[in-house]
Image (tube, rainbow, N blue to C red):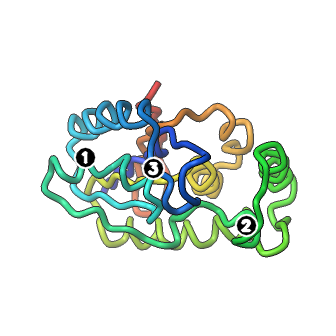
Amino acid sequence: MMTIIYMVRHAESPYDEGNERTRGLTEKGKSDVEKVTQVLIDEGVDVVISSPYTRAVRTVEGTAQHFHLEVATFEDLRERDFAAEDDVIDRGKLMSNIRENFNDSEYALYGGESNAECQRRAIAVLKSIVQEHTGRKIAIGTHGLVMTLMLSYFDSSYGFPFLEQLNKPDIYKLHFEDFELIEVVKLWG
């Protein structure tokens, strides 16, 4: 039975507002959410799930409201923990760290997690979602890196270059037969 997952990368978020968990959306991000909502309404979503981070939830909550659904959040769909919580990483160092993680999936900064660790926790949640909602259409509000790591679990061609070309927001439609990824279709951009 075919299960469809819509991986929805969150809309644009200001880096200077709140912390990783509470950052909201920019004005452009809020405007783009209306377009994301329309795409997902046209697809006919049955379930809405998200990372617990505000920017991810806000990107899919309009879809949930339209279909009178709750947004179920899963802690293990959160963004990768890049370093210890109190460590501030500048944007240049962050991108260097992310690139290095694609060369060595076990590499991590002190207090952070590796790509391999992040992928394991996100895939465990994805497996449970596909099992619980077999045959349904599920929107998942997520992050670019987490989405890339989930896709790379099935196909190693989804790596750093894929991550670099993603938009904020972005939508990819994944067709699953059981837990085998059959097809990936870009719906945004």
Answer with the quarter of the image where residue 92 lies.
top right
Residue furthest left in the image:
68
> Residue 183, image x and y in percent?
47, 42
Question: Is 171 left or right of 145, judged from the image as shown?
Answer: left
Label 2 packing within 10 angstroms: few (<14), some (14-19), many (20+)? some
Instruction: Give the Cα separation between the discs numbered 2 and 1.
Output: 32 Å
Badge nearest the viewer, 3 or 1? 3
Crowding near the residue tagged with mark 1, few <14, some 14–19, many ≥20 C-alpha atoms within 10 Å: many
- The numbered disc on residue 62 is 1
Residue 175, position in %: x, y?
40, 47
Q: Amino acid at mark 2?
A: Ala
Find numbered disc 2 in the image and state the secondary structure of the residue it sits on: helix
Above/below status of 185 relative to 134? above
Question: Going from the N terminus, do you reach mark 2 or mark 1 first?
Answer: 1
The residue lying toward the viewer, choosing from 133 and 111, is 111
In depth, the one of 128 and 73 nearer the eye is 73
Circle 2 residue: 116
**Given the image, on which type of amino acid does mark 1 rest?**
Gly
Q: Which mark is residue 24?
A: 3
Q: Residue furthest top?
A: 189
Report the residue at 52% width, 43% height from top.
Answer: 13
As displayed, is residue 44 above or below residue 57?
A: above
Residue toward you, 63 or 22 = 22
**Which of the marked residues, 2 or 3, is nearer the chain's N terminus?**
3
Marks 3 and 1 close (CB-CB < 8 Å):
no
Measured Cα–Cα span from mark 2 to mark 3: 27 Å
The vertical placement of 118 against 9, above or below, is below
